[in-house]
Image (spheres, grey):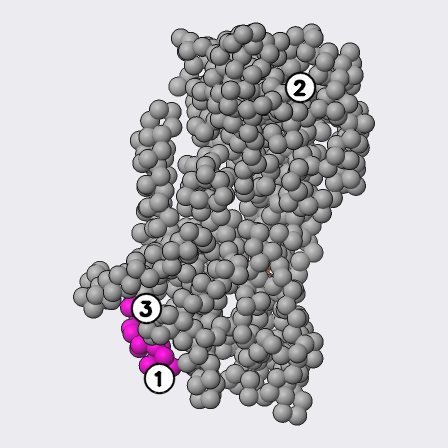
Amino acid sequence: MNLDFSEEQEMLRTTTRDFLTKECPKTLVRELEEDEKGYSPDLWKEMAELGWMGLVLPEEYDGMGMGFMDLIILLEEMGRNILPGPFFCTVILGSLPILEAGSEEQKKELLPKISAGELILTLALTEPSARYDATGVATRAVAQDDGFVINGTKLFVENAHIADYIICVTRTKEGASPEDGITLFLVDAKSPGIRCEVMPTMGADKLCEVVFADVKVPKKNMLGELDKGWPVVQRNMEQAAIAKCAEMIGGAQAALDMTLAYAKERVQYGRPIGSFQVIQHYCANMWISVETGKNILYQAAWKVGEGLPATKEVAVAKGYINEAYKFVSERGVQCHGAIGTTRDHDIGLYYRRAKAAELAFGDTDFQRELVAQQIGL
Amino acid sequence: MHFQFTPNEEAFRKEVRYYLEREIPKRWRELGFGLWEETDESWAITRDWNRKLGEKGWLAVAWPKEYGGQERPVMEQVVFNEEMTYQGAPTGVETMMTIGWVCPTIMIYGTEEQKQEYLRKAAKGEIVFCIGYSEPGAGSDLASLTTRAVADGDDYVINGQKIFTTMAHRADYCWLAARTDPDAPKHQGISMFIVPMNTPGVTVRPLTNILGFHSFNEVFFDDVRIPKENLVGEKNRGWYQLAIALNFERSGVAAPAGAKRMLEELVEYVKETRRNGEVLAKDPLVRHKLADLAVEIEVCRMLCYRIAGMQSKGLIPIHEASMGMLFGSELMRHLTTAGMQILGLHGLLNRGSKWAPLSGAIMRGHLASLSLGVGGGTSEIQRNIIATRGLGLPREPRV
Ligand SMILES: Cc1cc2nc3c(=O)[nH]c(=O)nc-3n(C[C@H](O)[C@H](O)[C@H](O)COP(=O)(O)OP(=O)(O)OC[C@H]3O[C@@H](n4cnc5c(N)ncnc54)[C@H](O)[C@@H]3O)c2cc1C
């Protein structure tokens, strides 16, 4: 066993952190919460120049050919800095399914543009039932002429309002099981019949409602095979859950660091509040959560990266890290006192993000159920 | 023992409920504003509401009649507060601070002129106070405050800064704690003042709360001159007066009453919402979460009654009050956390989305609940009080 990152990976972490600290200060993060687009095109371009969007894409598609673990490092740093924008949905929810299920033609057309930062993608899976399983997919795609026609409502679609393509998960057949009869389509986001609206959320994180009303998609835009799309979604959901965990751990680490610094600096009753035992115990518990969370994250991420079965590991990690991030950010606010409950301080940003991340790609109850199944229940 | 409200108390409850059901403005219901949500519109509504209650003598039901109250016993005040919160009446925190905190202190320590001037107007809903205690360097350790008030002829001249001053941008007066003797030990050099907010030299700068609303502020005092009559109580005895004032806030029956309402709304929601082809109300996980909350609400309510019971007998609850406040604030966190778990992704949505369950009230309540364990004395400080004053454990060194 080797539980350490390589030197190159440590370097990637440092350069990523330095870049984000400089280019994405919290003032920008706050501005973007209010911003209609929710991302900075300039910063996006710079990220593309650094090769981030194509980090795990093969070189033949202008990618960097690096591994999933490298992407995890990047995401951890993004979570640490609360980078707003469409990186997650373009890279994790967009490029990975294309890489896995796309035709050579689709890959050649889309992946180099993703690497270059020219395309924003997203995935439309969840519906008003808010489920991450196949049963939740009611949006229909019906064959017509030489294409398909999509009808249905998708909710909580990340950044659909700025996306060029939406990977839409549809039902094309009532199969023997809910998983049978799912088909993915690469839908041009400008297609007639698409109505997109940003939903008001706690984190102002640009989750959208996307209504498909008689949206025509050419056959060549089918991603993967007809009726057999679910395994692609399922693998992507595992990738997404663990990628989200990386963001969350990065955020939890930042919240811990910030709290530690504050506990040392804030003086009440003539001494730093960090000298009160109750604050020390909070901080110790927060650190335990972050460290144990990292271990469980890296193990699951490694398995996902290697293409090994990781259903249980991912569910364990997401379930655990959901609670860890929530705990760390909540205690973080508490240790800051009233200033932590303002929008003028950063710690509250982490709290709101922790809440949104907890619910993305399966909340804790959902993960518990998966773990229960995995241990034979 | 008799664990039941008296016929008088029940009759009053019925009267209050009947009134609230008819009189709470429709627009207020539409807004659905909760804790720390504040706009020009909500302010206008709460102001009108207070005047209306004031006319009925209901804004300060427990106060003496001569100051505009109805001299009702503590338990009727409890019943009143319960109904107001449960029915979602348009009462802002400034009312609680003015009627529940500041004015009762003036009643104890103020001169007759001060009482005539401020109490009657407050009971009519004509004026509100904000509370200028916390400073950038003095939060939990309030006694270390540094805002100065220096006697000069017939005046005091005030210099310094306050922070987290809730509703300073709306208030008519600031109830201010300032240092009048910098050489005395820190608890013995503080005095209380009433400062009109329109006095030259008072500057209010907004802070944005975690919900994104402007509810609290920084307040700066630059050579602010107020007449000596605006000192309340004895000079340099402010700390001891202020400690009494803090105790008014702490019986907290509003917490379980508000929680009960929210729980009932959640119960309705799970009864009419289907997930996995089944109504949510049938899911054992959901049932247990809600049942746990119902237990906690009942426990909290009884605790609050106990505290009110002490006050009925003229006792001053100290660690009991800390317990009540702690329990209430944690109840709100537990309730909204469990609520968000039950609502799932939809729970992230705010008002303005047709997909937002209960118009986003649980999510906003969840954010608001973060500050309940901080404002008015943090949970850590409450536990310190329970441990040291209640249980007699030794204090941490130098605290
Ligand atoms: C929504 C809201 C409204 C408010 N409104 C007003 C208002 O109208 N007027 C006003 O004057 N103030 C107001 N406050 C301020 C409030 O009174 C203070 O926030 C509170 O007293 C705590 O002070 P602080 O925020 O500076 O935290 P600090 O005292 O700096 O505490 C930071 C952390 O250290 C912990 N800590 C501090 N001392 C100890 C100790 N001895 N032992 C263990 N732990 C300790 C605290 O519990 C906390 O976790 C408001 C606060 C909030 C959140």
Q: Which residues are magenta?
A: B60-76
Residue at the spot of label 2 = A95
**Taking A217 as reference, is B289 left or right?**
left
Marked residue nearer the N-terminal end (3 or 1) = 1
Q: Nearer the viewer, mark 3 or mark 1?
A: 1
- Rendering coords of residue B348 (x, y %): 50, 39
- The image quadrant that residue B12 belongs to is bottom left
Q: Nearer the viewer, residue B352 or B124?
A: B352
The chain containing the residue under callout 2 comes to A
- Using a 10 Å C-alpha cutoff, classify the residue at mark 2 as few (fewer than 14 neighbours), some (14 to 19) or many (20 or more): many
Q: Nearer the viewer, residue A292 or A27?
A: A27
At x 54% / y 68%, what residue is drawn? B170
Residue at the spot of label 3 = B77
Q: Nearer the viewer, residue A129 or A300?
A: A129
Specify whether disc 3 shares its chain with disc 2: no
Disc 1 from disc 2: Cα separation = 74 Å
Asked whether the beta carbons under mark 3 and mark 1 sit within 8 Å of each other, the answer is: no
In the image, is the residue at mark 1 within 8 Å of ligand 1 by its beta carbon? no
- Using a 10 Å C-alpha cutoff, classify the residue at mark 1 as few (fewer than 14 neighbours), some (14 to 19) or many (20 or more): few
Q: Nearer the viewer, mark 3 or mark 2?
A: 2
Name the disc covering residue B66, or none.
1
Q: Quadrant of the N terminus of chain A?
A: top right
At x 30% / y 60%, what residue is drawn? B22
Residue type at mark 1 is: Glu
Disc 3 from disc 2: Cα separation = 62 Å
